[in-house]
Amino acid sequence: MTTAPRSTAEAPRTAIVTGGSRGIGRESVRRLAADGWSVVVNYAGRTSEAEAAVAEAAEAGGRAIAVRADVADESAVATLFDAAEEAFGGIDAVVHAAGRMYLSPVADLDLDALDALHRTNVRGTFTVAREAARRVSDGGTILLFSTSAIGLALPSYAPYVASKGAVEAMTLILAREMRGRDVTVNTVAPGPTATALFLDGKDEETVARLAAQPPLERLGTPADIAEVVAFLVSPQGHWVNGQVVRANGGIV
Protein backbone atom coordinates (compact mmCIF):
# COMPACT_ATOMS: atom_id res chain seq x y z
CA MET A 1 0.00 0.00 0.00
CA THR A 2 1.41 3.38 -1.01
CA THR A 3 0.49 6.61 0.75
CA ALA A 4 1.35 9.81 -1.08
CA PRO A 5 3.99 12.02 0.49
CA ARG A 6 2.74 15.18 2.16
CA SER A 7 3.68 18.41 0.47
CA THR A 8 6.19 20.51 2.38
CA ALA A 9 3.63 23.31 2.08
CA GLU A 10 1.28 21.31 4.28
CA ALA A 11 3.07 22.23 7.51
CA PRO A 12 2.98 21.35 10.30
CA ARG A 13 3.65 17.65 10.25
CA THR A 14 1.37 15.36 12.24
CA ALA A 15 2.30 12.67 14.74
CA ILE A 16 0.23 10.13 16.64
CA VAL A 17 1.72 9.45 20.08
CA THR A 18 0.21 6.45 21.84
CA GLY A 19 0.45 6.47 25.61
CA GLY A 20 0.65 10.24 25.26
CA SER A 21 -1.00 11.14 28.55
CA ARG A 22 1.86 10.08 30.84
CA GLY A 23 5.60 9.61 31.14
CA ILE A 24 7.74 9.36 28.03
CA GLY A 25 4.72 9.61 25.75
CA ARG A 26 3.54 12.85 27.33
CA GLU A 27 6.98 14.43 27.23
CA SER A 28 7.28 13.37 23.59
CA VAL A 29 3.98 15.14 22.86
CA ARG A 30 5.32 18.34 24.41
CA ARG A 31 8.68 18.05 22.63
CA LEU A 32 7.16 17.45 19.21
CA ALA A 33 4.73 20.31 19.71
CA ALA A 34 7.69 22.57 20.48
CA ASP A 35 9.06 21.61 17.05
CA GLY A 36 5.77 22.68 15.48
CA TRP A 37 4.16 19.28 15.05
CA SER A 38 0.43 18.71 15.30
CA VAL A 39 -0.02 15.83 17.72
CA VAL A 40 -2.75 13.29 18.36
CA VAL A 41 -2.51 12.29 22.01
CA ASN A 42 -3.72 8.72 22.38
CA TYR A 43 -4.65 7.52 25.85
CA ALA A 44 -6.31 4.51 27.44
CA GLY A 45 -8.29 5.91 30.33
CA ARG A 46 -6.84 8.99 32.03
CA THR A 47 -8.88 11.69 30.32
CA SER A 48 -7.74 14.54 32.58
CA GLU A 49 -4.08 13.71 31.97
CA ALA A 50 -4.65 13.50 28.21
CA GLU A 51 -6.33 16.90 28.28
CA ALA A 52 -3.39 18.27 30.25
CA ALA A 53 -1.02 16.90 27.60
CA VAL A 54 -3.06 18.66 24.91
CA ALA A 55 -2.83 21.91 26.87
CA GLU A 56 0.94 21.51 27.26
CA ALA A 57 1.28 20.95 23.53
CA ALA A 58 -0.58 24.18 22.85
CA GLU A 59 1.63 26.05 25.32
CA ALA A 60 4.68 24.63 23.53
CA GLY A 61 3.47 26.04 20.22
CA GLY A 62 1.81 23.07 18.53
CA ARG A 63 -1.71 21.85 17.97
CA ALA A 64 -3.08 18.72 19.59
CA ILE A 65 -6.19 16.66 20.16
CA ALA A 66 -6.77 13.73 22.51
CA VAL A 67 -8.26 10.45 21.27
CA ARG A 68 -9.04 7.54 23.54
CA ALA A 69 -8.24 4.09 22.14
CA ASP A 70 -7.15 0.68 23.36
CA VAL A 71 -4.02 0.01 21.30
CA ALA A 72 -4.78 -3.72 21.14
CA ASP A 73 -8.26 -3.15 19.69
CA GLU A 74 -7.99 -2.99 15.91
CA SER A 75 -11.25 -1.05 15.47
CA ALA A 76 -10.24 1.50 18.08
CA VAL A 77 -6.82 1.92 16.48
CA ALA A 78 -8.39 2.42 13.06
CA THR A 79 -10.62 5.10 14.58
CA LEU A 80 -7.55 6.75 16.14
CA PHE A 81 -5.88 7.00 12.74
CA ASP A 82 -9.13 8.23 11.18
CA ALA A 83 -9.26 11.02 13.78
CA ALA A 84 -5.69 12.06 12.98
CA GLU A 85 -6.42 12.24 9.26
CA GLU A 86 -9.68 14.13 9.78
CA ALA A 87 -8.13 16.65 12.17
CA PHE A 88 -4.81 17.28 10.46
CA GLY A 89 -5.00 15.87 6.94
CA GLY A 90 -2.46 13.07 7.18
CA ILE A 91 -0.01 11.20 9.41
CA ASP A 92 3.75 11.75 9.17
CA ALA A 93 4.92 9.87 12.27
CA VAL A 94 3.63 7.30 14.72
CA VAL A 95 5.33 7.16 18.11
CA HIS A 96 4.08 4.05 19.89
CA ALA A 97 4.93 4.70 23.53
CA ALA A 98 1.96 2.89 25.10
CA GLY A 99 2.86 -0.12 27.20
CA ARG A 100 2.54 -1.86 30.51
CA MET A 101 4.93 -3.57 32.90
CA TYR A 102 4.48 -6.80 34.84
CA LEU A 103 7.39 -8.23 36.83
CA SER A 104 7.48 -11.72 38.29
CA PRO A 105 9.82 -14.68 38.67
CA VAL A 106 8.92 -17.24 36.03
CA ALA A 107 8.04 -19.81 38.71
CA ASP A 108 5.44 -17.46 40.17
CA LEU A 109 3.90 -16.18 36.95
CA ASP A 110 0.26 -15.15 36.97
CA LEU A 111 -0.67 -16.25 33.45
CA ASP A 112 -3.64 -13.91 33.29
CA ALA A 113 -1.32 -11.00 34.07
CA LEU A 114 1.08 -12.29 31.43
CA ASP A 115 -1.72 -12.40 28.86
CA ALA A 116 -2.71 -8.82 29.72
CA LEU A 117 0.91 -7.69 29.38
CA HIS A 118 1.31 -9.32 26.00
CA ARG A 119 -2.05 -8.01 24.81
CA THR A 120 -0.80 -4.45 25.25
CA ASN A 121 2.92 -4.80 24.54
CA VAL A 122 2.86 -7.36 21.73
CA ARG A 123 -0.59 -7.37 20.16
CA GLY A 124 -0.89 -3.61 20.74
CA THR A 125 2.43 -2.93 19.04
CA PHE A 126 1.53 -5.09 16.04
CA THR A 127 -1.92 -3.51 15.80
CA VAL A 128 -0.54 0.04 15.83
CA ALA A 129 2.36 -0.88 13.53
CA ARG A 130 -0.01 -2.51 11.04
CA GLU A 131 -2.16 0.60 10.82
CA ALA A 132 0.92 2.81 10.66
CA ALA A 133 2.40 0.75 7.81
CA ARG A 134 -0.82 1.28 5.88
CA ARG A 135 -1.32 4.97 6.58
CA VAL A 136 1.90 6.83 7.39
CA SER A 137 2.73 9.22 4.58
CA ASP A 138 5.65 8.38 2.31
CA GLY A 139 8.79 9.85 3.84
CA GLY A 140 7.42 9.38 7.36
CA THR A 141 8.45 7.54 10.50
CA ILE A 142 7.26 4.61 12.63
CA LEU A 143 8.83 4.62 16.08
CA LEU A 144 8.32 1.79 18.57
CA PHE A 145 9.50 1.26 22.15
CA SER A 146 11.46 -1.52 23.84
CA THR A 147 13.65 -1.50 26.96
CA SER A 148 17.37 -1.67 27.71
CA ALA A 149 16.48 -4.24 30.37
CA ILE A 150 16.61 -6.78 27.54
CA GLY A 151 20.40 -6.91 27.92
CA LEU A 152 20.58 -6.89 31.71
CA ALA A 153 19.07 -10.30 32.62
CA LEU A 154 17.40 -8.89 35.73
CA PRO A 155 15.46 -11.40 37.85
CA SER A 156 11.67 -10.95 37.63
CA TYR A 157 11.90 -9.07 34.32
CA ALA A 158 11.28 -12.09 32.06
CA PRO A 159 7.60 -11.29 31.30
CA TYR A 160 8.28 -7.66 30.43
CA VAL A 161 11.53 -8.28 28.54
CA ALA A 162 9.97 -11.09 26.52
CA SER A 163 7.19 -8.78 25.37
CA LYS A 164 9.70 -6.14 24.33
CA GLY A 165 11.89 -8.72 22.60
CA ALA A 166 9.00 -9.19 20.18
CA VAL A 167 9.08 -5.47 19.40
CA GLU A 168 12.80 -5.54 18.65
CA ALA A 169 12.40 -8.62 16.46
CA MET A 170 9.86 -6.90 14.23
CA THR A 171 11.76 -3.61 13.86
CA LEU A 172 14.23 -4.52 11.12
CA ILE A 173 11.66 -6.70 9.35
CA LEU A 174 9.09 -3.92 9.19
CA ALA A 175 11.77 -1.48 8.05
CA ARG A 176 12.51 -3.79 5.13
CA GLU A 177 8.83 -4.23 4.37
CA MET A 178 8.53 -0.44 4.00
CA ARG A 179 11.03 -0.43 1.12
CA GLY A 180 9.93 1.93 -1.64
CA ARG A 181 8.04 4.25 0.73
CA ASP A 182 10.99 6.17 2.29
CA VAL A 183 9.48 5.35 5.71
CA THR A 184 11.87 4.68 8.59
CA VAL A 185 11.13 2.16 11.33
CA ASN A 186 13.11 2.26 14.57
CA THR A 187 12.74 1.29 18.21
CA VAL A 188 13.87 3.30 21.23
CA ALA A 189 14.98 1.20 24.21
CA PRO A 190 15.24 3.41 27.30
CA GLY A 191 17.20 2.44 30.37
CA PRO A 192 15.87 3.14 33.87
CA THR A 193 13.78 6.28 33.46
CA ALA A 194 11.96 8.21 36.15
CA THR A 195 8.38 7.56 35.08
CA ALA A 196 5.42 6.36 37.10
CA LEU A 197 5.56 3.04 35.23
CA PHE A 198 9.18 2.48 36.26
CA LEU A 199 8.94 3.78 39.83
CA ASP A 200 5.74 1.95 40.77
CA GLY A 201 6.38 -0.69 43.44
CA LYS A 202 10.11 0.06 43.85
CA ASP A 203 11.55 1.14 47.20
CA GLU A 204 14.15 3.90 47.54
CA GLU A 205 17.03 1.45 47.84
CA THR A 206 16.08 -0.27 44.58
CA VAL A 207 15.68 3.03 42.75
CA ALA A 208 19.05 4.25 44.04
CA ARG A 209 20.75 1.03 42.96
CA LEU A 210 19.31 1.24 39.46
CA ALA A 211 20.17 4.93 39.20
CA ALA A 212 23.81 4.13 40.01
CA GLN A 213 24.18 1.59 37.17
CA PRO A 214 24.82 3.94 34.22
CA PRO A 215 28.23 5.63 34.03
CA LEU A 216 26.28 8.90 34.10
CA GLU A 217 25.05 7.86 37.57
CA ARG A 218 21.42 8.90 37.40
CA LEU A 219 18.05 7.81 36.15
CA GLY A 220 17.01 8.97 32.75
CA THR A 221 14.19 11.47 32.47
CA PRO A 222 11.26 11.50 30.08
CA ALA A 223 12.84 14.60 28.53
CA ASP A 224 16.03 12.64 27.76
CA ILE A 225 14.02 10.09 25.81
CA ALA A 226 11.81 12.69 24.13
CA GLU A 227 14.94 14.27 22.64
CA VAL A 228 15.77 10.93 21.01
CA VAL A 229 12.20 10.70 19.71
CA ALA A 230 12.38 14.23 18.27
CA PHE A 231 15.62 13.40 16.46
CA LEU A 232 14.42 10.12 14.99
CA VAL A 233 11.22 11.63 13.55
CA SER A 234 13.07 14.66 12.17
CA PRO A 235 14.67 14.97 8.72
CA GLN A 236 18.06 14.93 10.48
CA GLY A 237 17.33 11.46 11.87
CA HIS A 238 15.94 9.95 8.68
CA TRP A 239 19.08 7.99 7.76
CA VAL A 240 18.67 5.93 10.94
CA ASN A 241 16.49 2.99 9.95
CA GLY A 242 15.81 -0.52 11.23
CA GLN A 243 17.65 0.16 14.48
CA VAL A 244 17.15 -0.32 18.21
CA VAL A 245 18.47 2.83 19.88
CA ARG A 246 19.48 2.14 23.47
CA ALA A 247 19.04 5.46 25.26
CA ASN A 248 20.27 4.45 28.69
CA GLY A 249 23.20 6.55 29.88
CA GLY A 250 25.73 3.85 29.05
CA ILE A 251 24.34 0.71 30.71
CA VAL A 252 25.88 -2.32 28.99
Image: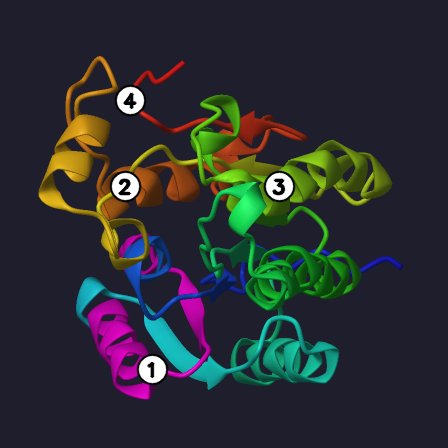
Per the rendered image, the range of residues in magenta is 30-58
| Image-based side of 190 in relation to 106, left or right | left
The residue carrying mark 4 is 249
Q: Residue at x 74, y 40 (%)?
A: 170
Residue 58, image x, y percentages: 24, 73
| Amino acid type at image mark 3 | Ala
Q: Mark 4–mark 2 contact, CB under 8 Å?
A: no
Q: CA distance from mark 3 to mark 4?
A: 22 Å
SS class, disc 2: loop
Q: Earlier in the sequence, mark 3 or mark 2?
A: 3
Residue 244 sits in quarter: top right
Which amino acid lies under the numbered mark 2 shown in the image of this protein?
Thr
Alpha-carbon neighbours of circle 2 within 10 Å: few (<14), some, or many (≥20)?
Answer: many
Q: Residues within 10 Å of mark 3 (few under 14, many from 20)?
A: some
Residue shown at 82% from the left, 34% from the top: 176
Which secondary structure lies at badge 1? loop
Q: Badge 4 local density, few (<14 within 10 Å), some, or many (20+)?
A: some
The disc label shown at residue 193, or none: 2
CA separation, marks 1 and 4?
A: 30 Å
Compared with 206, 70 (above or below) is below
* Residue located 33% across and 70% down the image: 21
The one nearer the camera, 196 or 155, is: 155
Residue beneath disc 1: 46
* Pointer 3 residue: 162
Disc 3 and disc 2: Cα gap in Å? Answer: 19 Å
Q: Position of residue 144 (x, y in %)?
A: 57, 47
Q: CA–CA distance between discs 1 and 3?
A: 27 Å
Q: Nearer the viewer, mark 3 or mark 2?
A: 3
Q: Is residue 82 in view?
A: yes
Q: Nearer the viewer, mark 1 or mark 3?
A: 3
Residue drawn at (64%, 75%) of the image: 81
Label 1 amino acid?
A: Arg
